[in-house]
Image: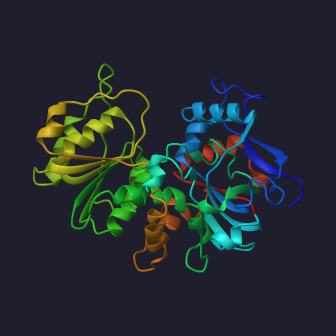
Amino acid sequence: MGTDMWALTFDRSREDWSTSKGLVKERVPVPQLDEPGGADRSSCIIRVKAAGFCGSDRGIWWRKAFGDMILGSLDKEGADRRVIGHELLGEIVAVGERVHEKYGYEPGMVVSTESHIVCGVCAQCRVGDLHVCADDKIIGISRDGCFAEYVKLPAKALWPTDLSRIRPEVAAVQEPFGNAVHACQSTDLRGKTVAVIGCGTIGLFAILIARGMGARRVIGVEVDPHHAELAKKLGCEVVLRPAMPPKDRPWASDPGLIEQVKALTDGVGVDVVFEMAGFNSALNNALRMARRGGHVVLFGVKNGDAHIEDYHRVIMNGLQLHGVVGRQIFGTWEMTRALLENPLNGIQDAVWDVILNKGDGTRVHIDDWEPEAFEQMIRRHPKVLIDFER
């Protein structure tokens, strides 16, 4: 493995969080397992094949999200540098002394990983709600991640991947695909009319999954013309463009958008709305376009307070709100595998052909990585891969 490797990092001794942007490619030490009997007896070293650049990573790139978690975790570690990245496909190259007996992993096996490293002892973990662990650590945010040639991970977080059934580029994005799977499992979609507000990467995945889970119609809501076109290719019957809310009421819903949705649903509204954008106005649009008794799945993240229009209508319309974070560990991963490995539903092909654009402009090798060019890639495409092997 050598003693050092390429990695993409943020280093607070080198750049100030509030005034910088992007990541830096640099040589860093290769992670090592402790001596036998040490803390790493249930950990593995993974040689990264490919890593996906996520919406969370975009937030880090432009310093709009996760600064408190990164800086706080570095404080606890007494460190300055964080290797970013949490979506990966890789090969196990070394295992701790307990890994094979306890988890069945050994060098040479291909894996992806759950990005939330759960504590296993909090109240939530004890009752099986691992996805809302009270003391979890997130790869690439609160511990070193996978935008590197090697990464050290606990075996309990790994997910075995069969490359004879799933192409490696798609296997590298199982983790964010699982976000959308978790959202779509919030309620039964069979025969339902669905709206997806925000057709970024997770929204695009949700369109595919909703179709795969039996939704009758899918309506997209998106402001970006390129993403709107991708949404149509993935199965949206129509993609509507919301109006920008008034500057003095940035939380306001769009009456024209609601009317268009009602017109498409015989005046009723949609059965299920996925709010994937994270804007206050999008939240109010979601609440207003859902039918009476409908479901609103909340996935888009917004810091701070939110203003809800006509809150009493949430109650009087009997709306059911579902907050979704991460993936259920590992139930969501089982459904992810079932959807991606089924050649009949066309989902895997659509991820590669449409969302990943068959690799055209969406892949860069770490040897060729350069920040300005990479920023242009992530501006143009909803999902980008960083390759670490030739």
Query: Which residue is drawn at the image coordinates 60% and 38% (left, top)?
Result: 60
* Vertical placement of residue 241 versus 305, above or below: below
* Vertical placement of residue 311 versus 385, above or below: above
* Vertical placement of residue 280 versus 200, above or below: above
Query: Which residue is drawn at the image coordinates 23% and 66% (left, top)?
Result: 216
Closer-to-camera residue (247/361): 247
Query: Which residue is drawn at the image coordinates 10% and 54% (left, top)?
Result: 266
Closer-to-camera residue (103/13): 103
Estimate the x, y position of residue 201 in percent, counting from the top left: 47, 52
Estimate the x, y position of residue 247 in percent, counting from the top left: 33, 21
Q: Is residue 81 left or right of residue 291?
A: right
Q: How many marks?
A: 0
Residue 326 visible? The answer is no
* Vertical placement of residue 86 versus 44, above or below: above
Q: Quadrant of residue 49?
A: bottom right
Estimate the x, y position of residue 46 in percent, counting from the top left: 73, 62
Q: Quadrant of the N terminus?
A: bottom right
Q: Is residue 137 left or right of residue 198?
A: right
Residue 58 visible? The answer is yes
Q: Quadrant of the C terminus?
A: bottom right
Estimate the x, y position of residue 104 in percent, counting from the top left: 65, 74
Q: Is residue 67 left or right of residue 279?
A: right
